[in-house]
Image (cartoon, grey):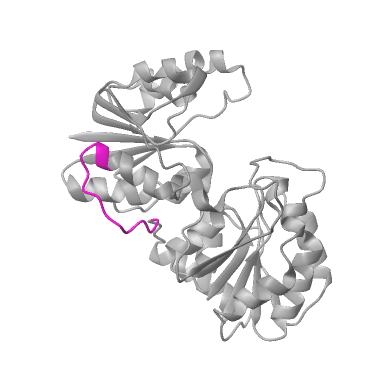
Amino acid sequence: MKALFFRIGAIGDALLTTPAVRVFKETFPDCEVHYMAGRGAAKILENNPYIDKVIVFNERFFKVPRFLRVLLMAPGIKKSIDPYYDYFIDFESSHYSAMISSSVNSGSKFGFLIKGKKRRYNKYYKNRFDYKQQQTYIAYRHMALAVSAGAKAEEDITPVFKLTDAETEEGRGFYSANKIEGPVVHVCLSGTWTAKKWPLNHWKELIKLLSEKINVVVIWGPGDEGDIEQIKQMNLARVFVTPDLGLRQMASVLSFGKLLITNDNGVRHIAGALGLNTIGLFGPTNEKSWADINKKSIVLVSNEPCRPCDKTSCPDLKCMEGISVKSVLEAADKFI
């Protein structure tokens, strides 16, 4: 038996599907599980014990009109996947992914019910699951879809992310090289949207105050270069900025921390999978959908009435400005 899971999206999007993949594999241990993901997200799925093969989705056609994409991608998709799958489970379940599914030969195709103007794309699937609780953490939605395909339901929705021993040692090397001893708090300034990013001045103040009582490691990614230069120029004794790292290298450094403070991004989900405490700063996105709020996770939001709006950019960023440095420090004190 073979199953193909599908989710393009960003790092966090793919990572939050992994609890569902785990329960599916545990229910059907003899099933060969393949997962097709975008290039960035595919990295997060490497070394996952519940996935037998990761297939990188060819994203080079994303800049052409949508009606051409499926026609252009279909031959490549068919070449990269197996001729037949017993199950095709589409975690994305958009009209776009429904069109892509036409390239997959499968006896049972599962996806979420598409409503509204795009509902005609439901015809591409034999099984459509109508998940009505849209204000629920998205990992539970993915779990429900896997259960609709026959997996046994579980309450544990911890994302699955595994470092190799070599990667763990690489992370340890960062601390040895910088002579970092004692507890560490990580901060990450990254955000896929500008509207998701906490103001740099807030970060600078927070890092300065944190460094007065604990070591601070600043991790970052593409697009953060200018902000990181300003952090470096502060020249604070207990603040350590990582070099430009790949995704899994960054995770290896993160794995030695006690707490991560960051925006709503994929790094926060990685930290949760690694067992760290997390503080997530939410603005335009809905924390009810994207945060598992538990004893190891705190979410901070402002009281702006316009949020959540899901806008990728905003002229005033009041929702992020409104999260005070004081409130973040108070939350951090609960973990350090």
Counting from the top left corner in percent of width and height, residue 52 is at 29, 44
Task: Tally the numbered discs.
Answer: 0
**Which residue appears farthest toward the front when viewing the image?**
305
Q: Is residue 250 above or below residue 84?
A: below
Where residue 142 sits, quadrant-wise, is: top left
Counting from the top left corner in percent of width and height, residue 245 is at 61, 58
- Asked whether residue 238 is in view, the answer is no
With 25 as the anchor, is 215 left or right in this view? Answer: right
- Asked whether residue 49 is in view, the answer is yes
With 325 as the anchor, is 141 left or right in this view? Answer: left
Is residue 215 within the magenta segment?
no
With 29 as the anchor, is 71 left or right in this view? Answer: right
- Closer to us: 173 or 104: 104
Where are the magenta residues, as a range? 147-159
Q: Main secondary structure of the magenta part?
A: loop
Q: Is residue 219 above or below residue 38?
A: below
Residue at 69% across, 40% down: 312
Residue at 68% across, 40% down: 311
Counting from the top left corner in percent of width and height, residue 229 is at 80, 62
Residue at 64% across, 46% down: 192
Name the image quarter holding the N terminus.
top left
With 239 as the anchor, is 287 left or right in this view? Answer: left
- Closer to us: 130 or 98: 130
Residue at 66% across, 76% down: 216
Counting from the top left corner in percent of width and height, residue 267 is at 55, 57
Where residue 127 sits, quadrant-wise, is: top left
